[in-house]
């Protein structure tokens, strides 16, 4: 039985389905991933056997590849949300945050820790809230 995972962008114009299992789940701290997510790290699932099917809004998906690199990102042209990308004939990359289905796989590894942001340390000591503090 094939696993089916669904996802969408923030505005809901783009929806998709992934059929098949993910093989790895990396939390990437490289400078490029930090810049294109605006966060401490990118959280991407990868698969060499799953199939990506756009259910709606495929015409609203665009891809940016940083010149002279393999660093690519697909996103919604309306809301800017990160979306899956077919990196080559076999490999797909899916940002975990765009999934509507639960992610049942635990991250495989943190990668590019040598590029980790200087403020991304000792975060267990930072105050925690269940919602926006007043």
Image (cartoon, rainbow, N blue to C red):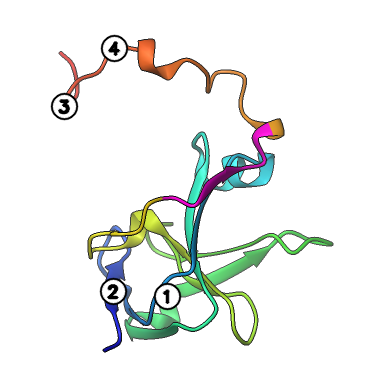
Q: CA distance from mark 1 to mark 2?
A: 20 Å
- Quadrant housing residue 123: top left
The numbered mark, 1 or 2, whose residue comes first in the sequence reads 2
Q: Quadrant of the N terminus?
A: bottom left
Foreground: 122 or 15? Answer: 122
Q: Which mark is residue 131?
A: 3
Residue 22 horizontal side relative to residue 34, left or right: left
Q: Position of residue 21 (x, y in %)?
A: 39, 76
Residue 73 horizontal side relative to residue 79, left or right: right
Q: Residue at x 58, y 77 (%)?
A: 91
Q: Quadrant of the C terminus?
A: top left
Q: Position of residue 96 (x, y in %)?
A: 39, 57
Residue at which label 4 appears: 127
Residue at which label 1 appears: 60
Q: Report helix, strand or loop for mark 1.
A: helix
The numbered mark, 2 or 4, whose residue comes first in the sequence reads 2
The residue positioned farthest toward the right in the image shown = 68
Q: CA distance from mark 3 to mark 1?
A: 31 Å
In reply to whether residue 13 is colored magenta, the answer given is no
Instruction: Kindly check if marks 3 and 4 are in contact, taking CB atoms under 8 A apart as contact.
Output: no
How busy is the neighbourhood of tag 4: few (under 14 within 10 Å), some, or many (20 plus)?
Answer: few
Q: CA distance from mark 4 to mark 1?
A: 38 Å
Q: Tell me where the magenta segment starts and ends, as one range.
A: 107-113
Q: Which mark is residue 5?
A: 2
Q: CA distance from mark 3 to mark 4?
A: 12 Å
């Amino acid at each position: 039985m094939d696993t089916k995972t669904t996802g969408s962008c923030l505005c809901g114009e783009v929806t998709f389905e992934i059929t098949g299992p993910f093989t790895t789940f990396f939390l990437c701290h490289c400078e490029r991933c930090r810049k294109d997510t605006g966060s401490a790290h990118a959280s991407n699932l990868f698969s060499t056997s799953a199939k990506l099917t756009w259910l709606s809004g495929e015409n609203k998906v665009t891809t940016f590849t940083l010149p002279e690199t393999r660093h690519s990102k697909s996103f919604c042209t309306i809301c800017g949300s990160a979306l899956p990308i077919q990196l080559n004939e076999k490999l797909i990359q899916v940002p975990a945050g765009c999934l509507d289905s639960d992610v049942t796989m635990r991250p495989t590894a943190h990668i590019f820790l040598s590029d980790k942001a200087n403020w991304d340390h000792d975060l267990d000591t930072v105050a925690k809230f269940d919602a926006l503090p007043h």
